[in-house]
Structure formats: structure tokens, C-alpha cells
Amino acid sequence: MQKISPFLWFDGNAEEAVNFYASVFPNATIGKILRSSKAGPGREAHVLTVSFELEGQQFTALNGGPQFKFTEAVSFTVSCNDQAEVDYYWDCLSEGGEPRQCGWLKDRFGVFWQITPVRLIELMNDPDPDVAGRVATTMMSMEKFDIAGIERAAKGI
């Protein structure tokens, strides 16, 4: 068990969200589902928490109610090796959600993700400041990342 893991607060749809995430990520497992007892909290047999794992990262989803919403202040990055991965995760996670600038999106449950090509990070760390600057400028103009466009920017094309 991980010593530290994210605890995600949902408004009554934690189990639906977990099932969705498990369908998106190929290395996903759904763990224990804790339900309310007669003593509560909430309605008897109502889902309280769902433990799950995505790509080796453990999470807990909580049906906590409408008091708190997700914000960009806490988000998850998905590192992608190629454009096919960028397209897959972007398309799946943005469906019913909202695309944002620089590879960010808010999914239909309100959780924020950044779908990031590994190549982008490599080029942003290029020792040539002109290359890194062109890549950063190009990145800022994109919603979903286009690796070919990022490569062209790196070359000054």
C-alpha cells in the first residue's frame, strides 16, 4: 500500500467515475467499495468510498457531497509516448468535459488532467534557450498537444 495516495471527493457519482477511469486506463483495478451501514453516514447501502488503482497509482473516491469541487490546483498528468496516446487519453477524458489550454482538460466529473507528450518535456528542457522558447510559445497556443507541431517549432519551422 502506498503511504500517500489521492482521495478524490465526488458528489454522489464516485462509483460511476471510478468505472469510467478503469475503462480508460489499461492498467486499472477497482478495489473495495465501502457502503453506509444502518447507522450512516447517509442512506443505508449507499457507496461511501471506492478504492482503485490506475497505472500503479492508488486512489480513493469518496461520495462526499456538493460542498467541495475539483479545481486546477490539484490535477493529474498523463505522460504519453506518442501522438496516438495523446489522442486516446485526450479524446477519452475530454468527452463530456472541457478542453483547456496547454494540454489541460476538465473531465465530465470535474477532475483536471494534463495529457503531456514526453517529447514536449524533453524539448522544453533543451539546452538551447531558443529551442525551449519556441516550444514553450507553441505549447501555449495549443489545447490538445500536436507532437509534429511541437517538433516543427523546435526546428524553427
Image (cartoon, rainbow, N blue to C red):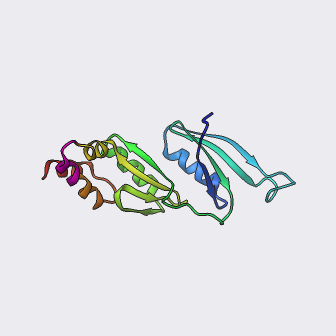
| Residue 35 left/right relative to 3 | right
Side of 94 where 50 appears, left or right: right
Q: Is residue 32 above or below residue 153?
A: above
- Indicate the quadrant containing the N terminus: top left, top right, bottom left or bottom right: top right
Does 96 sit above or below residue 35? below
Q: Position of residue 41 (x, y in %)?
A: 80, 56
Residue at the far top: name it: 1
For image coordinates 76% across by 55% down, the residue present is 46
Picture coordinates of residue 37, whole percent (x, y): 83, 51
Residue at position x 39%, y 50% from top?
115
Farthest-out residue, right: 39
Relative to 17, does residue 27 appear above or below in the rendering? above
Q: Residue at x 36, y 50 (%)?
A: 87
Q: Position of residue 92 (x, y in %)?
A: 45, 53
Query: Which one is nearer the viewer's eye here, 34 or 154?
Result: 154
Residue 128 colored in magenta in the image:
yes
Magenta stretch secondary structure, dominant: helix
Residue extent of the magenta highlight: 127-134
Closest to the observer, 26 or 14 = 14
Residue 80 screen position, x and y as percent: 37, 43
